[in-house]
Amino acid sequence: MENQDFGQRQMFQGNWKCSECAAEITELPFEPSGDRPLFCRDCHRAKRSRF
């Protein structure tokens, strides 16, 4: 079986604020569109654990 190396996910640099706690976000694994809220790692993890 061949080992596939997909490499690192492209990260986007910027200066955003978490919609929940207003923490600074400087790097995201996607380019935000501006029409959806952004969450820092801690807030995102907390939101995911609620479901």
Image (cartoon, rainbow, N blue to C red):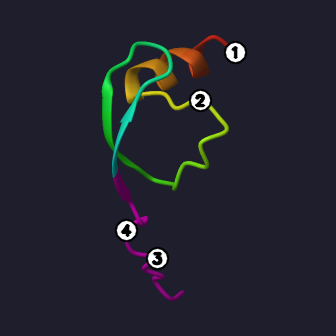
| Residue most extreme to the bottom | 2
Mark 4 / mark 2, whichever is N-terminal: 4
Using the image as rendered, state which of residue 11 and residue 19 is in the foreground.
Answer: 19
Mark 3 / mark 1, whichever is N-terminal: 3
Q: Which residue is mark 4?
A: 8
Overall secondary structure of the magenta section: loop
Q: Which residue is mark 2?
A: 37
9 above or below 27?
A: below
- In 3D space, how far apart are the residues under numbered discs 3 and 1 (Cα atoms)? 30 Å
7 above or below 49?
A: below
Tell me the quarter of the picture where residue 50 sits: top right
Q: Which residue is mark 1?
A: 51
Quarter containing the C terminus? top right
Q: Residue at x 43, y 64 (%)?
A: 9
Given contact means CB atoms under 8 Å apart, are the residues at marks 2 and 3 in contact?
no
- In 3D space, how far apart are the residues under numbered discs 1 and 4 (Cα atoms)? 28 Å
Under circle 2, the secondary element is loop
Residue 27: percent from the left, percent from the top?
Answer: 33, 47
Side of 36 relative to 7 (left or right): right
Q: Is residue 11 magenta?
A: yes
- In 3D space, how far apart are the residues under numbered discs 2 and 3 (Cα atoms)? 28 Å
7 above or below 39?
A: below
Tell me the quarter of the picture where residue 26 sits: top left
Q: Residue at x 55, y 48 (%)?
A: 32
Q: Nearer the viewer, mark 1 or mark 2?
A: 2
- Range covered by the magenta-colored residues: 1-13
Residue 29 disc label: none
Q: Which residue is mark 3?
A: 6
- In 3D space, how far apart are the residues under numbered discs 4 and 2 (Cα atoms)? 25 Å
Dot 4 crowding, Cα within 10 Å, few <14, some 14–19, many 20+: few
Q: Amino acid at mark 2?
A: Pro
